[in-house]
Image (spheres, rainbow, N blue to C red):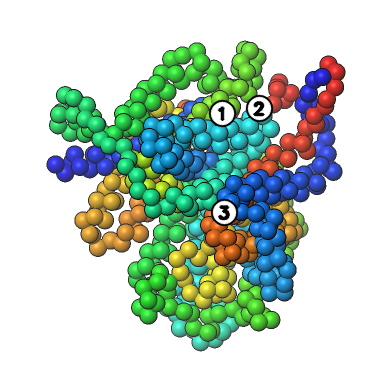
Amino acid sequence: MMVEILLDATIRAGTSILYATLGEILTERSGIINLGVEGLMLIGALSGFYVSHITGNLYLGVLAAFILAALAGMIHGFITVYLRANQIVSGLALTMFGIGVTALFGKKMIGIPLNGFQKIEVPVLAKIPIIGVFFNQDILVYFSYITVVILSFILFKTKFGLKIRMVGENPGAADTAGINVYKIRFFSTVFGSGLSGIGGAYLSLAYTPLWIENMSAGRGWIAVALVIFASWYCYRAMFGAYLFGGINALQLRLQAMGTNVSAHILQMLPYFFTIIVLVIATIRLEKGARVEPEGLGLPYDREDRR
Amino acid sequence: MKIKIVKRSEQNRFVLVIAPFIAILFSFVIVGIFLYANGLNPFSVFKDMFVESLGSFYGFSETLVKTTPLLLCGLGVALAFRMELWNIGAEGQLYIGAFGASLVALYYPINNHFLMLLAMFLSAGLFSGIWGMIPGFLKAKWNVNEIIVTLLMNYIAILWVDYLVYGPWKDPKGFNFPLTKQFPDVARLGYYFDTRLHTGFFIALVLAFLFYILIEKTVWGYEIRVIGNNPNAAKYAGINYEKNVIIVMFISGLLSGIAGFSEVAGVTYRLQHGISPGYGYTAIIVAWLARRSALGVLLVSFIMGVLFVGNDALQINYQLPIAFINAFQGLILFFVISSEFFVNYRISFGEK
């Protein structure tokens, strides 16, 4: 059925962005902007692919993607949290670094086929019309649903999550309350980076089980934009990621159907669409109460505390 | 023994000057390790980089050829940085400028050499200026994050040029390569000394000089600096923030667009796929390292030009990917912003 085919493609195209958006939400909730998502996704995609290829185990690949992206995120975390450097420049540097390093080490991986994650049907649920599509996916998609729930729970229902949000809203007050601002921010950046890495691994292990240079193709930036669209909430991120996935699926569908519109023009749609969504989300946010973490983007220095 | 981080009461000037050099040195060491991990001898790779880019008259001229777009884009990004606007869209603006120039060169038969180039220049500047103005407008009107918008617009601009060179503008005699037919002679910038060094370089120098005058010597330049330093104070002084955001983004986009004009009119003589190997992204580093000054942009874009020419040689001699230079530049940025810590802080060792 046409709707189900499109919905299936929507979920598949949205999942990698969902992971990246969730990672960025965690990081930004603690007050750190990470513009390195694009680079982290590439690091995740390559390390996931490489480790899966040499070990023959896809799960080890996902683990490697998480760890390596987290390690790369550690650079950003160290420089911005402890050295109090400009978060925007550091993030851009991380993206450039990710693009370059994966091109350098990935050269030998180009053209190698890989047997990626296969679909696993969830009994009963997969039989429901339309909704069933959500339950006939690969394991990484299921894991993404769980991540949304868990991350949202941690951020909004636990003491630890409260600390993260406090550090992002008002690091000075958090510090006074005895919270280690540096540690929390560093942890959030590193863990968030790891999640972005899994987003990259989804591309190279499930979406198109291959390594292609620069294969994230701007999804990292779309994720950064979706954080604003989601107003820093996990469930809305899910909606945003699938919205983007839907546009992408539609675009690919139109290409496959052989419309008169050039493939290059169709490929512009997701970026164009993301800008529109960003503008609408920003206007909405500006009008209502600000939901952006108050301390976002500002380095914290104990000595400057008033 | 206890390690303590102490904030300096004032910036250390010596560290301020020396820090970037040490930072660049560190990035060479790390890149060397990466190269070694890839089975290459880092010393011979670095030697080749410098010999190719600086070791001969021709190599030097090639470095200036690569310096040209970096200088222009660097000026554009630096201007936006002046008022704390993050224009990360220089790459896309370059593509749109190249499109604007090509549109005139390919479809408007002007027979006068000077008039043709002037028309291409203006068309490039107009298209890229408006392209840059869009995120400026969104920022001024609704405070839309300009970083994300400019960045996403890069992808759109590159796809637009790809659409043209793979589609309607494709040269029918081009053996199916993604490029347009060559520009007529009147649409080409002159070149010098039997090298590829072209008039675009001198245009860039003139624009760098104008940039300096505009920013350092005019009232408007002063306003821009005030906004950058303290937007609230600027508002009290009656400076129109919104209007200036739009104007600055227009000029910023225009400068990067001129880089696109200079590349098609001076180097490739046609519009083609992948016209820039990331000049627009490098421009961000250039502007940051230059601390936003015109002379700094000139100096740093030359250094980055060396890296680009060197990288070309490495592609041929060692089959290193083009994106290798990205890793290098990312590391330089990491180390430079880390080094800035030591300008503001000092680490003291001693008994508690």
Q: Chain of mark 1?
A: A
**Which quarter shows the N terminus of chain B?**
top right
From the top left corner, tell me how far across and down residue B115 is, in percent. 56, 81
Q: Chain of mark 2?
A: A
Instruction: State the CA–CA distance, disc 3 to disc 2.
Output: 34 Å
Is residue B262 depicted above or below A186 in this figure?
A: below
Label 3 neighbour load within 10 Å: few <14, some 14-19, many 20+: many
Kind of residue indicated by mark 2: Tyr
Circle 1/circle 3 CB separation < 8 Å:
no
Circle 3/circle 2 CB separation < 8 Å:
no
Element type at mark 2? loop
From the top left corner, tell me how far across and down residue B329 is, in percent. 62, 50
From the top left corner, tell me how far across and down residue B236 is, in percent. 67, 40
Kind of residue indicated by mark 1: Gly
- Find disc 2 in the rendering and name its residue: A300
Circle 1/circle 2 CB separation < 8 Å:
yes
Tag of residue B324: 3
Is residue B320 visible in the rendered structure shown here? yes
Mark toward the start of the polypeptide (1 vs 2): 1
Kind of residue indicated by mark 3: Phe
Q: In the depicted view, which residue is nearer to us: B256 or B267?
A: B267
Which quarter of the figure has residue B79? bottom right
Label 1 neighbour load within 10 Å: few <14, some 14-19, many 20+: many
Tag of residue B74: none
Give the residue at the far bottom of this rendering. B111
Residue in the image at 70% along x and 70% along y: B60
Residue in the image at 80% along x and 47% along y: B17
- Find disc 1 in the rendering and name its residue: A31
Q: Is residue A42 left or right of residue A179?
A: left
**Which quarter shows the C terminus of chain B?**
top right
Which quarter of the figure has residue B58? bottom right
Which quarter of the figure has residue B6? top right
